[in-house]
Amino acid sequence: MTSTRQLKFSRLMQKELGELFQRDQKSFFSGNIIAVTQVDVTPDFSLAHVYLSLVLDGDKEKMLEKVQSHKGDIKKNLSKSMGRKVRKIPDLEFHLDLGAEHAQKMDSIFKSLNIPPEEEI
């Protein structure tokens, strides 16, 4: 069960990380668009699972690795922007959010089905 404090902290981190990725996308991430779709913080606030949606032409796994490689810089910048609001920045663990891709795939499957309309009685 997630506490109110965890939810508030998660929303704050999501907002700050979103702004950070938007601001630094050209320098760190080759201009690719990275959206933070969700942040889940553990009850002890030591770890934050950050779910990213990536809009790019290339390999998403490679871009996720690039984000992981900049984890220290991201955490430092996050500390600068959130420093007065929180005591400690949790460790960051990045994940791909495949929800939108999954929904798009399911939508295309449904569209490809050939279901005849029901006959009226």
Image (cartoon, helix red, strand yellow):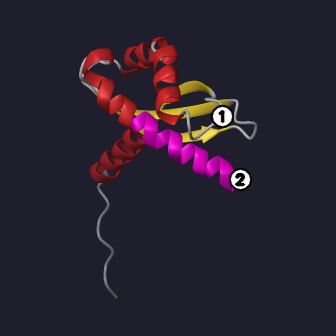
Q: Amino acid at mark 2?
A: Ser
Residue that mark 2 sits on:
3
Residue plotted at (31% across, 78% down): 119
The local crowd at label 2, few if under 14, some if 14 to 19, many if 20 or more residues have their Cα within 10 Å, is few
9 in magenta: yes
Residue 5 pos. (x, y %): 67, 51
Vertical comparison of 94 with 9: above or below: above
Q: Secondary structure at mark 2?
A: loop
Who is closer to the viewer here, 51 or 71? 71
Q: Is residue 3 left or right of residue 105?
A: right
On the image, which quarter does residue 30 sit in?
A: top left
Q: Amino acid at mark 1?
A: Arg
Q: Nearer the viewer, mark 1 or mark 2?
A: 1
Residue 90 pos. (x, y %): 63, 29
| Majority secondary structure of magenta residues | helix
Residue that mark 1 sits on:
87
Residue plotted at (31% across, 84% down): 120
Is residue 4 visible in the rendered image? The answer is yes
Circle nearer the N terminus (1, 2): 2
Number of marks present in the image shown: 2
What distance separates the C-alpha of mark 1 from that of mark 2? 18 Å
Residue 12 pos. (x, y %): 52, 44
* Residue situated furthest top in the rendering: 69
Residue plotted at (55% across, 32% down): 83
Vertical comparison of 101 with 107: above or below: above
Q: Which residues are magenta?
A: 3-18
Who is closer to the viewer here, 16 or 111? 16
Point out which mark residue 34 bears: none
Picture quarter with the C terminus? bottom left
Residue 7 pos. (x, y %): 61, 50
Q: Is residue 3 left or right of residue 30?
A: right
